[in-house]
Amino acid sequence: MKVKVLILPKEGLLDPEGRAVKEVLEDNGYKVKDVRVGKMIELDVEDPSQVKEIVEKFLYNPLIEEYVIE
């Protein structure tokens, strides 16, 4: 089973890459409220019940990131 994990910086934390993207968009005339840059990881697992454990042990940093499993 394929599972997607979206990992983003926590709300309110410094996101230099997101800020840079926002500035480029605004410099080119786009009105953007906020940009957060993260990562998407696709896992092909046999047992989907293990995905949360995999993410929490190996794929994200709980101090600065949050995640969503799709």
Image (tube, grey):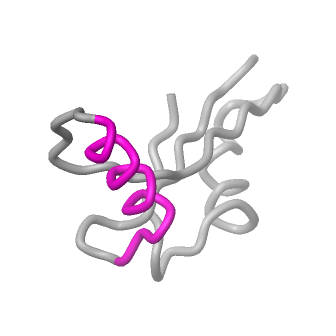
Q: Nearer the viewer, residue 63 or 14?
A: 14
Q: Residue at x 73, y 20 (%)?
A: 2
Give coordinates of residue 64: x percent, y percent. Answer: 46, 77
Viewed as shown, does residue 57 lie left or right of 25? right
Q: Residue at x 37, y 77 (%)?
A: 14
2 relative to 18, above or below:
above
Viewed as shown, does residue 60 lie left or right of 13? right
Q: Quadrant of the N terminus?
A: top right
Q: Nearer the viewer, residue 25 or 65?
A: 25
Give coordinates of residue 37: x percent, y percent. Answer: 48, 51
Question: Residue 16 lies in magenta, yes or no?
Answer: yes
Viewed as shown, does residue 32 lie left or right of 62? left
Magenta highlight range: 14-28
Farthest residue, direction bottom: 63
Give coordinates of residue 65: x percent, y percent. Answer: 47, 67
Task: Assign the magenta stretch its main secondary structure.
Answer: helix
Q: Residue at x 33, y 49 (%)?
A: 35
Question: Residue 17 lies in magenta, yes or no?
Answer: yes
Quadrant position of residue 68: top left
Give coordinates of residue 7: x percent, y percent. Answer: 53, 51
Disc tally is: 0
Farthest residue, direction top: 1
Q: Nearer the viewer, residue 54 or 25?
A: 25
Q: Residue at x 47, y 82 (%)?
A: 63
